[in-house]
Image: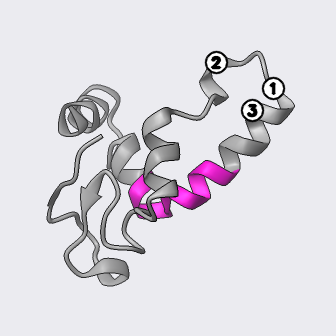
């Protein structure tokens, strides 16, 4: 799940936060926009393909910290520094 992925990257790779928490923190719309550009430039690169869960969340307005919900729940919205719960994929 979400927490497992993020925990693995924190413990295994020494990252201060996992990739899904970071995406939520930055903004899922921002991450989506970046991937749109990269996938257009590198259409054969699987790493730059837009994950269906990301596209679905952005379409639903679940943009991460800035909207209060993304992969995680952010109780104080944009003022949050840490998630308050899990939203799901």
The circle on residue 42 is 1
Residue at (39, 63) in percent of width and height: 64
- The stretch in magenta equals 23-33
Quarter occupied by the N terminus: top left
Q: Is residue 26 left or right of residue 72?
A: right
Dot 1 falls on a residue whose secondary structure is: loop
What residue would you read off at disc 3?
A: 39
The circle on residue 46 is 2
The circle on residue 8 is none
Task: Inspect the magenta stretch and tell me whether residue 66 lies in it.
Answer: no
Separation of residues labelled 3 and 2 (CA atoms) = 8 Å
Residue 19 image point, x, y percent: 40, 41
**11 or 46: which is nearer to us?**
46
Q: Is residue 42 left or right of residue 10?
A: right
Residue at (59, 35) in percent of width and height: 50
Residue at (46, 46) in percent of width and height: 56
**19 or 35: which is nearer to us?**
35
Q: Residues within 10 Å of mark 3 (few under 14, many from 20)?
A: some
Residue at (49, 62) in percent of width and height: 26
**20 or 10: which is nearer to us?**
20
Q: Is the magenta region chiefly helix, strand or loop?
A: helix
Dot 2 falls on a residue whose secondary structure is: helix
Q: Residues within 10 Å of mark 2 (few under 14, many from 20)?
A: few
Separation of residues labelled 1 and 3 (CA atoms) = 5 Å
Q: Residues within 10 Å of mark 1 (few under 14, many from 20)?
A: some
Residue 58 image point, x, y percent: 50, 56
Q: Is residue 43 above or below residue 76?
A: above
Dot 3 falls on a residue whose secondary structure is: helix
Furthest toward the left, the residue is 85
Quarter occupied by the C terminus: top left
């Amino acid at each position: 799940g979400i927490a497992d992925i993020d925990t693995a990257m924190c413990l295994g790779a020494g990252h201060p936060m996992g990739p899904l928490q970071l995406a939520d923190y930055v903004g899922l719309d921002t991450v989506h926009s970046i991937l749109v550009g990269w996938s257009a430039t590198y259409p054969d690169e699987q790493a730059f393909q837009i994950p269906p869960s990301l596209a679905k969340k952005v379409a639903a307005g679940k943009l991460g910290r800035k909207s209060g919900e993304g992969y995680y729940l952010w109780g104080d919205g944009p003022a949050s520094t840490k998630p308050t719960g899990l939203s799901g994929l």
